[in-house]
Amino acid sequence: MDSLGAVLGVIVGGQFAYLLPEHLFTLIIGCFVLITAWLPQPRIVGENRVVQFIGGAVISALSMVVGPTGPLIATFIKGLADRRQLVATHAMLMTVQNLLKVITFTALGFAFAAYLPLVAAMIVAGFGGTAVGSHILLKVPERAFRIGFKVVLTVVALDLIRQALF
């Protein structure tokens, strides 16, 4: 995912963040993640800068409307051959996207002060998860990692579909 596309995406998506029905986008994202987790697809990452730019813009625009798009990013980069590169790339892309979202929502006037304790707890949990995950990543065989990756994407996709429908 191209970071310049992400900048464009948060600007465009920020304009629609309050206008579109969240449940519709949540359902679409859940279905998209579920389908792409299991169907064969061409490798996108590293092959075409235009596709990366467009992917970054679209995913970041969607993130402004529906919030969590980690599964979409994971689907977009799952073709990376090395699992350490996949995890590191996903982490970096999520960091860039979330930083851009904070900047955009701040510019739009969102008051974060009431949520600072939750944000702090999420940051601490994120660091803890990263420490544990990094340790596990080095010990899990490649095949088990790929299967686990698909299972996690499937569970997240099914939960998104459930949220959208109920």
Image (cartoon, rainbow, N blue to C red):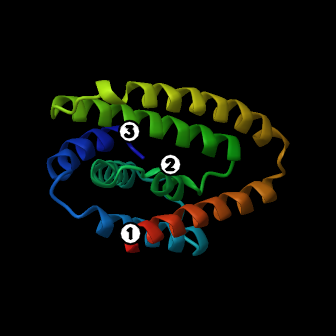
Secondary structure at badge 1 equals helix
Find disc 3 in the rendering and name its residue.
97
Above-or-below relation of 100 to 14: above
Quarter of the image holding residue 7?
Answer: top left
Image x and y of residue 74, in percent: 53, 53
Mark-to-mark CA distance, 2 and 1: 33 Å
The residue under label 3 is which amino acid type? Gln
Classed neighbour count for the residue bearing mark 2: other residues with Cα under 10 Å, few (<14), some (14–19), many (≥20)? few
Above-or-below relation of 165 to 59: below
Q: Is residue 4 visible?
A: yes
Mark-to-mark CA distance, 3 and 1: 23 Å
Mark 2 or 3, nearer chain start: 2
The residue under label 1 is which amino acid type? Ala
Q: Residue at x 45, y 34 (%)?
A: 95
- Does residue 57 appear to the left or right of 93 in the view shown? left
Task: Tell me the quarter of the image containing the C terminus.
Answer: bottom left
Q: Residue at x 18, y 48 (%)?
A: 12
Find disc 2 in the rendering and name its residue.
46
Image x and y of residue 18, in percent: 18, 52
